[in-house]
Amino acid sequence: MAISSTMELPFGAKAPDIALPNIDGKITSLADFGDAPTLLVMFICNHCPYVLHLREHLVQLVKEYQSKGVAVVGINSNDVKRYPDDAPDKMAEAAKRCGFTFPYLFDESQEVAKAYRAACTPDFFLFDKDRKLIYRGQYDDSRPKGDIPVTGKDLRAALDAALADGPLPQDQKPSVGCGIKWKPGNEPDFA
């Protein structure tokens, strides 16, 4: 069942810290993204049809904006006991197969997803150079099995505005996707 992102992390909120293992086993934190002018945090996973729908396009968009200095990180917070396709070894396989050029982190405790108030995959959060939230919302209006093409227009508009120090889009629509697969008993108040 599709759900929408919470849109609850307020504009201007400082990016919650990250200290999670990448698929190579190394711990990645916000400090690893240094002075990048913007930071895109994406909650994604391997099996969600909403992520699969835009993944190829997203990989290309990420490469384009990384060449402009944008730092990008993907985080998988799903319960791998119930959803083994999202286990770290499968994450590494997907990253290699799809050509990910960004760290792909595993949030086993699900505490990072809770801190960001991430509810679905995909869920996008864009932070400025001071790591304050400037965008949270959808990739674009396309959906699996829909007739709207994948363009990334919403996220692209936010990235372009951030890089130009221009006004951010005011019409920020919630992302839609599969709900994060919370461990039994670990569901947050917003799930």
Image (cartoon, rainbow, N blue to C red):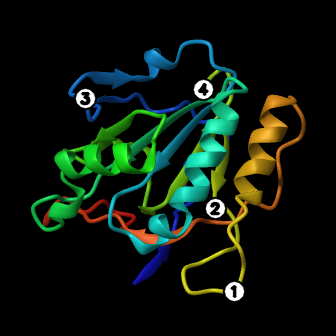
Query: Which residue bears the numbered disc 3?
Result: 24
Q: Viewer-proximal residue, 57 or 11? A: 57
Q: Secondary structure at mark 3?
A: loop
Q: Which quadrant: the N terminus?
A: bottom left
Query: Which residue bears the numbered disc 1?
Result: 147
Whichever of callouts 2 and 4 sits on the residue coming sooner in the sequence is 4
Q: Residue 83 in the image: x percent, y percent?
A: 18, 66
Q: Viewer-proximal residue, 8 or 82? A: 82
The disc labelled 2 sits on which kind of residue?
Gln
The disc labelled 1 sits on which kind of residue?
Asp
Q: Is residue 183 above or below residue 25?
A: below
Distance Cα–Cα, label 2 vs label 1: 17 Å
Q: Is residue 134 above or below residue 46?
A: above
Q: Residues within 10 Å of mark 2 (few under 14, many from 20)?
A: many
Query: Which residue bears the numbered disc 2?
Result: 138
Whichever of callouts 1 and 4 sits on the residue coming sooner in the sequence is 4
The disc labelled 4 sits on which kind of residue?
Arg
12 on left or right of 120: right
The disc labelled 3 sits on which kind of residue?
Asp
Residue at the image position 27 percent from the left and 23 percent from the top: 27
Query: Which residue bears the numbered disc 4?
Result: 131
Q: Secondary structure at mark 1?
A: loop
Q: Residue 143 in the image: x percent, y percent?
A: 59, 78
Q: Residues within 10 Å of mark 4 (few under 14, many from 20)?
A: many
Whichever of callouts 3 and 4 sits on the residue coming sooner in the sequence is 3
